[in-house]
Amino acid sequence: MSTSTYTVTGMTCGHCVSSVQKEIGGIEGVTGVEVDLASGRVEVTSQAPVSDEAIAAAVDEAGYQLA
């Protein structure tokens, strides 16, 4: 089990959180995504380490950016 923490910028509401969770959660091997709207903190749990590039691409697809 691997856990990584990121900061996502631009999220302003619950819909934003849901979008980020959905896109990151769709990455193969990801088993959990916890998003804190106030801080922009995103904790990703996965079976094996997931590349930062894959996380950045998923966040971009949701319409946001990694800080």
Image (cartoon, rainbow, N blue to C red):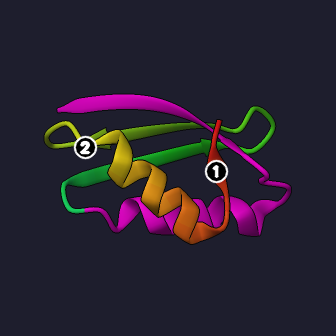
Residue 7 on the magenta span: yes
Which quadrant of the view contains residue 51? top left
Question: Quick check: 15 above or below 37?
Answer: below
Q: Is residue 18 left or right of residue 11?
A: left
* Label disc, if present, on residue 50 of the rendered structure: 2
Is 14 included in the stretch rendered in magenta?
yes
* 35 vs 59, nearest the viewer: 59
Residue 47 is situated, as x and y percent measured from the top left of the image, at 15, 43
At horizontal 36% and vertical 40% (from top left) the residue drawn is: 52
Q: Amino acid at mark 1?
A: Gln
User: Left or right of 22: which side holds 50?
Assistant: left
Point 23% across, 31% down: residue: 2
Query: First in sequence: mark 1 or mark 2?
Result: 2
Q: Which residues are magenta?
A: 1-27
- In the foreground, 53 or 36: 53
Q: Quadrant of the N terminus?
A: top left
Query: Residue 57: image x %, image y %?
Result: 44, 59
Residue annotated with mark 1: 65
